[in-house]
Image (tube, grey):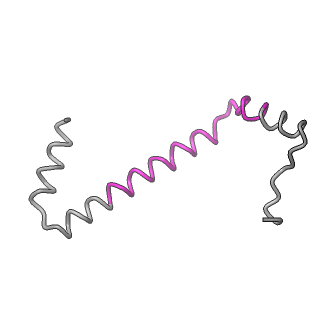
Amino acid sequence: MSGETEELVRICDALPQGKRREVTNFARFLLARESDEAWERILGDPNGHPKLEAFVKDALAEGSEVLDLGRL
């Protein structure tokens, strides 16, 4: 376990239950935000997404239709 993790555990142990819940919720928020930022980096890759583009091209050639959100 890293030193930061051990420190966080000690801090949480010293807090009342309601405050521990707040710390946990904040940690979950940070994780979700990190995940969102990772997706933004992936989607914004200037090299494009050749495997995805090939998959879409093949799917359309096989008769799949482009998703029409208005028909959902």
- Quadrant in which the N terminus appears: top left
Whether residue 37 is in magenta: the answer is yes
Q: Residue at x 32, y 59 (%)?
A: 26
In the rendered view, tell whether residue 68 sits above or below residue 41. below
Q: Quadrant of residue 57?
A: top right
Count of labels in the image: 0
Q: Quadrant of residue 25?
A: bottom left
In the rendered view, tell whether residue 57 sits above or below residue 23. above
Furthest toward the front, the residue is: 62
Q: Nearer the viewer, residue 2 or 56?
A: 56
Whether residue 28 is in magenta: the answer is yes
Q: Nearer the viewer, residue 28 or 45?
A: 28
Q: Is residue 28 left or right of residue 20?
A: right
Q: Nearer the viewer, residue 65 or 14?
A: 65
Q: Residue at x 16, y 49 (%)?
A: 9
Q: Is residue 29 left or right of residue 14?
A: right
Q: Residue at x 71, y 33 (%)?
A: 48
- Tell me residue 38's x, y (percent): 51, 42
In the rendered view, tell whether residue 34 sits above or below residue 69. above
What residue span does the magenta drawing correspond to?
A: 26-54
- Quadrant in which the C terminus appears: bottom right
Q: Residue at x 86, y 45 (%)?
A: 64
- Tell me residue 6's x, y (percent): 15, 43
Q: Main secondary structure of the magenta part?
A: helix
Furthest toward the bottom, the residue is: 18
- Tell me residue 68's x, y (percent): 83, 58
Q: Quadrant of residue 58?
A: top right
In the rendered view, tell whether residue 21 sits above or below residue 39. below
Q: Is residue 70 left or right of residue 31?
A: right
Q: Is residue 20 left or right of residue 50?
A: left
